[in-house]
Image: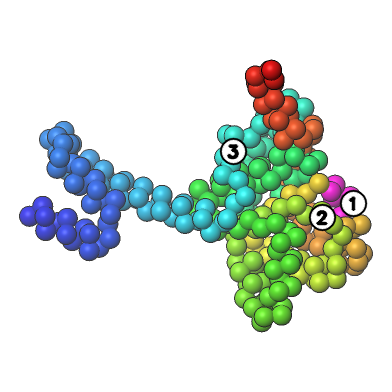
């Protein structure tokens, strides 16, 4: 009878429940649990199995630059990080409200790491996330214009619950890039959330975008409903290299 039950679980793809049921047969769990407790144990095992598979799929599709977690963010004094705000952001309520997030700071200050950490938190809350480098994204969209896949690419960007645009403003945008960004932000406005990671203070975005009319439209769709984190301090990479160097044995 147990073998028939396990075959049916396997056919129904109840893999978590199947594993928990098999483990219960090998141990003494059936003797220590009531029927209600045992049923809850099987359901929990199936839920956990499906959740872990969903999380793994979302993380893979997001294509994060870093495997980052909220708890791994450096909260050192002088970094200008509000722990309470960090906790609120990690709860992902702002994504449900379709608000945005802007992270600024110097090169190596941990902007990309923080953005990926927030993206991971969003995946844990079962949001569809996509991480992209701005320069690579705009180059890709230019190619898609030529091969006829542009419409499909824009729709894919529009449907993401959270879109992370990393390294925004590393160089001045050309006409195509400005229009690309305006188009997918227009499709997302009021419906989805966006994270911008950049070295450029918001006050200087007009200079980077170039065209004042388009710049005003882009900023209007990003800034006014955005939370802002301004990271302070020097480069985290340089600090790590310096600390790593201090641990090296002396050169003989």
Residue 120 located left or right of residue 234: left
Residue occupying image coordinates x 46% and y 52%: 56
Q: Residue furthest front?
A: 252
Circle 2 is placed at which residue position? 169
Residue occupying image coordinates x 37% and y 53%: 50
Mark 3 vs mark 1: which is more N-terminal? 3
Asked whether the residues under the numbered discs 3 and 1 touch, taking CB atoms below 8 Å apart as contact, a structural biologist would say: no
Circle 1 is placed at which residue position? 204
Residue 82 appears in the picture as rendered: yes
Observer-side mark, 1 or 2, equals 2
Which quarter of the rendered picture does the C terminus lie within? top right
Tell me if residue 185 comes above or below residue 203 in the rendering: below
Asked whether the residues under the numbered discs 1 and 2 touch, taking CB atoms below 8 Å apart as contact, a structural biologist would say: yes
Q: Secondary structure at mark 2?
A: loop
Residue occupying image coordinates x 66% and y 42%: 114
Circle 3 is placed at which residue position? 70
| Region in magenta | 200-205
* Structural crowding at the residue carrying mark 2, measured as other residues with C-alpha within 10 Å and reported as few (<14), some (14–19) or many (≥20): many
Say whether residue 136 is magenta.
no
């Amino acid at each position: 009878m147990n073998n028939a039950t396990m075959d049916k679980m396997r056919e129904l793809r109840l893999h978590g429940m199947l594993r928990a049921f098999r483990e219960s047969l090998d141990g003494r769990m059936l003797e220590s649990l009531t029927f209600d407790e045992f049923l809850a144990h099987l359901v929990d095992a199936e839920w956990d199995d499906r959740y872990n598979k969903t999380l793994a799929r979302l993380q893979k599709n997001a294509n994060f630059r870093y495997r980052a977690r909220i708890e791994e963010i450096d909260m050192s004094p002088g970094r200008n990080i509000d722990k309470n705000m960090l906790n609120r952001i990690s709860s992902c309520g702002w994504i449900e409200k379709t608000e945005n997030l802007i992270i600024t700071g110097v090169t190596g200050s941990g902007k990309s790491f923080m953005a990926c950490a927030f993206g991971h938190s969003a995946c844990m809350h079962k949001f569809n996330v996509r991480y992209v480098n701005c320069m690579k994204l705009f180059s890709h969209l230019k190619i898609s214009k030529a091969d006829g896949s542009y419409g499909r690419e824009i729709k894919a960007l529009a449907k993401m619950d959270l879109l992370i645009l990393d390294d925004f403003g590393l160089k001045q945008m050309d006409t195509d890039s400005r229009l690309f960004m305006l188009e997918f932000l227009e499709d997302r406005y009021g419906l989805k959330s966006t994270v911008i990671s950049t070295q450029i203070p918001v006050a200087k975005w007009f200079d980077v975008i170039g065209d004042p009319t388009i710049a005003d439209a882009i900023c209007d769709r990003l800034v006014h409903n955005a939370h802002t984190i301004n990271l302070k301090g020097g480069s985290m990479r340089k600090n790590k290299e310096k600390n790593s160097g201090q641990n090296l044995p002396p050169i003989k």
